Amino acid sequence: MADTKISALPAATAVAAADVIPIVQGGVNKKATVSLLNVLGGATSVAGSTGVAIGPGASTSGINRGVAIGYNTIAASYGLALTGGFSSSQANNAGSLAIHGDANGDLSSAIGFNSAAQRAQTAGSGAMALGGSYASGTDSFAAGIGDNTSTYGAKGANSVAIGYRCNATAANSLAIGSSANALASNAVALKSAYVSGTYCIGIDHGGLATQTIAGSSNVAIGGGVETTSDATQSVVLGSYSKSASHGKLAYASGRFSAVGDAQTAITTLRVATSDAVATKMSTNGSGAGALNQVVLPNNSAYRFTVEIVAKQTGSTNCAGYTITGVIVRGANAAATTLKASSKTVDWEDNTSWDVSASADTTNGALSISVTGAAGTIIAWVANVRTTEVTYA
């Protein structure tokens, strides 16, 4: 086949790095291996087989099929690194993608600059960072952070951080907005909320003091609102409202000096009885304590209205009651006093049923008790509306 034209040669079905092809160099016919042709445009080196490096300082590392194109790009096995020459890109881990970025996790993607010319950075498997952002959690996503350091970004597994200096640090957390912080597992922080409680949601307009959303399964919407580490399944709305207990819905439009010192609230209580013994109601149906009643903070007074409904199982027997009054708490729980209380019986099918309000001086709370009948299963639900002031 010495006189056969190249165009007449049989077609190859695959090409290996050591295969030889003809080239013309300086007007002279020469031969070159495929691996040599993979290093073009001033590229440094190609490691492994079937890698491609094009551009000054471009190189591949690892075993197979890395592609590095552009100034000082580096591509690991099955990685792809691209740059237009403004800055380098590094696809440092297997299967990673870097376009004006540094991809340091397997199968991760780092793409684009931020306005400070910082490259996107990834450090977790399957992570994606866009626009000079940082993502280090497994399968996390960060975009538009404006900072590519580990101070901000998506750092928890399956976390998402989008927006200026947002921070999603725990598994399944979500931070979107400007300086939003989702710091606990399954937490959601929007706008500029600061959420440190698990399964909590915070939406902060950013015009007032920073939200403090701790506890578990709480929802906060507004500025300067707060749920404490003791709060669970609470909702705080408006400006400077607060919950420190279970199941409280609080609203405020401002404050005197402290969060929660001028607000209204709704608390739902429940209990089931099967005897004629007075039983305290609670927000979770369990024994009444310091977190599941209408608990007053020190140096506060509440005006309250309690609406109670009861229904006997397997019967149409029911009852309805209304209790209104005023309760005050001094410097500690022992200084809790019921100042006034008035009960109205709206309806009773069984006149032996009863309800009452009292001051719980152990827990510093408004205590609502119900009394049923022996051998009778009764479900009781109370809606407690409070107008609250705290003033030392």
Image (tube, helix red, strand yellow):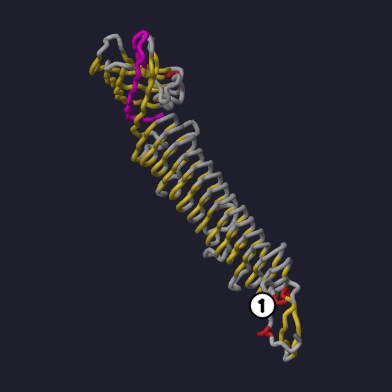
Quickly name the residue at label 1.
11
Q: Nearer the viewer, residue 123 or 108?
A: 108
Task: Provide residue 207's location: percent of width, then percent of height.
Answer: 40, 49
| Picture layout, residue 144 above or below residue 246 | below
Q: Secondary structure at mark 1?
A: loop
| Picture layout, residue 385 above or below residue 119 | above
Q: Nearer the viewer, residue 232 or 300?
A: 232
Task: Provide residue 382's location: percent of width, then percent of height.
Answer: 33, 23
Q: Is residue 197 left or right of residue 275?
A: right
Residue 354 within the magenta-colored segment of the rendering:
no
Task: Provide residue 54's location: percent of width, then percent of height.
Answer: 66, 74
Q: Amino acid at mark 1?
A: Ala
Task: Provide residue 50's location: percent of width, then percent of height.
Answer: 69, 69
Q: Please state, as top left, top right, bottom left or bottom right, where the N terminus lies in the image.
A: bottom right
Q: Nearer the viewer, residue 324 or 334?
A: 324
Residue 9 falls in image quadrant: bottom right
Residue 303 falls in image quadrant: top left
Residue 390 within the magenta-colored segment of the rendering:
yes
Residue reaching furthest to the bottom? 27
Residue reaching furthest to the left? 346
Image label count? 1
Q: Please state, as top left, top right, bottom left or bottom right, where the C terminus lies in the image.
A: top left
Q: Nearer the viewer, residue 41 or 72?
A: 41
- The residue drawn where x is 69% and y is 67% is 60
Residue 267 falls in image quadrant: top left
Which portion, as a residue range, is magenta?
369-392
Q: Main secondary structure of the magenta part?
A: strand
Label 1: how many Cα within 10 Å (few below 14, some 14–19, many 20+): few
- The residue drawn where x is 73% and y is 71% is 17
Q: Is residue 55 left or right of residue 179?
A: right
- The residue drawn where x is 36% and y is 19% is 368
| Picture layout, residue 2 above or below residue 90 | below
